Amino acid sequence: MNTYVDRYAEQVVNDANSDISKYLTFLKERGLTLGGVSTEVVLLKISSRYVKPNNTAISAIGEALAGWYLQTKKNLIPLARPIQEGADLIFMDEKRDSYFLVSVKATMGQFINTFLKDATVALLKYANNNIKYIPPTTLLSNYIIGVAIKKNENYEIKSIKIDLG
């Protein structure tokens, strides 16, 4: 996983899986830190329900799995990893003279379909603004990829492909 995180993630992460594993362990030990200190003080109405996973690790895993999926399962060639740009990844298929703008959304929750809908609208707007730069004989497509982190190294990947012409 770390190879793909290093290759495709926007942010630098040392070990995203380790961060997620630590968070999941914390949830099992509900009410205590990993070091055994209570996270709740009933008298002050402080509870551990607001503990959150490392969002950078979640994003890095999502981007890594999206890159892995497109590279190994769809046989696409990675072309670019834009930083803070409209597309998260750009891939190409030389055989078909086509480019793929990719948006990635990752979550530890159950709302992956909602994330995919939001990402689709944003990526289509980005593609519409940039389609003028693509030669008329070239196919431009969008991939919207959602990654749901279920447990340690247990993921669900959903993808939507939209051909723009």
Image (spheres, helix red, strand yellow):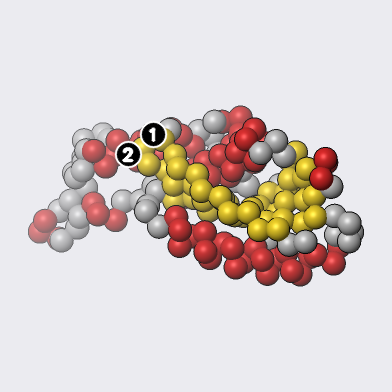
Q: Residue at x 50, y 44 (%)?
A: 157
Quarter of the image holding residue 137? bottom right
Q: Residue at x 77, y 51 (%)?
A: 99
Whether residue 128 appears in this view of the structure is: yes
Q: Amino acid at mark 1?
A: Asn
Quarter of the image holding residue 121? bottom right
Query: Is residue 2 placed above or below 156 in the rendered structure?
Result: above
Q: Which residue is mark 2?
A: 24
Q: Amino acid at mark 2?
A: Leu
Q: Position of residue 56 (x, y in %)?
A: 51, 47
Q: Position of residue 37 (x, y in %)?
A: 21, 40
The residue tagged with tag 2: helix, strand or loop? Answer: helix
Assign the C terminus to one quadrant of the image. bottom right
Q: Residues within 10 Å of mark 2 (few under 14, many from 20)?
A: some
Q: Position of residue 9 (x, y in %)?
A: 61, 43
Q: Which residue is mark 1?
A: 152
Query: Is residue 148 placed above or below 29 in the rendered structure?
Result: below
Mark nearer the viewer, 2 or 1: 1
Side of 53 relative to 90 (left or right): left
